[in-house]
Amino acid sequence: MNEQGRMFPTFASIGVIIVMLGGCALGPTRLEADYGKSVSLAKTQQILDPAAQQNLAPVYGFDGKAAAGTIERYQTSFEKPPPPPSFVISVGQGS
């Protein structure tokens, strides 16, 4: 085999590697640059007051008994669902 025949696989391999690395070196496409923007935009639009985290004053208007009752009712709602209502329609019984 001559010198040219032995060098072809080497140059072909180097060429394939260069092409593969060239594909990785490209920056994000226009579509890829916008990934995640819709989620962050939706999350931002759902925040009523962005500066609310700076206000450390306690919230007034909900006393302790009402809050405790609400939390207890919330926690017991996961225990067992209430039975479905049963309706009885009697047909054919006369009186």
Image (cartoon, grey):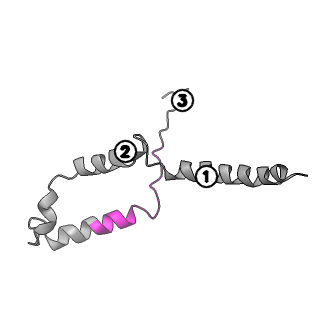
How would you classify the magenta stretch by its main secondary structure? loop
The image quarter containing residue 85 is top left
- Within 10 Å of disc 2 (Cα), the crowding (few <14, some 14-19, many 20+) is few
Q: Is residue 46 in view from this perspective?
A: no
Asked whether the beta carbons under mark 1 and mark 3 sit within 8 Å of each other, the answer is no
Q: Number of numbered discs present?
A: 3
Q: Distance between the residues labelled 2 and 3?
A: 70 Å
Of the two numbered discs 2 and 3 on the same chain, state the one appearing first in sequence: 2
Q: Residue at x 48, y 43 (%)?
A: 86
**Residue hosting label 2:** 34
Question: Which amino acid type corresponds to the residue marked 1 in the rendered image?
Answer: Ile
Q: Is mark 3 on a helix, strand or loop?
A: loop
**Residue hosting label 3:** 93
Question: Which amino acid type corresponds to the residue marked 3 in the rendered image?
Answer: Gln
Q: What stretch is highlighted in magenta?
A: 71-86
Q: Distance between the residues labelled 1 and 3?
A: 90 Å
Q: Is mark 2 on a helix, strand or loop?
A: helix
Residue 48 included in the magenta stretch of the image: no
The answer to whether residue 63 is left or right of residue 37 is left
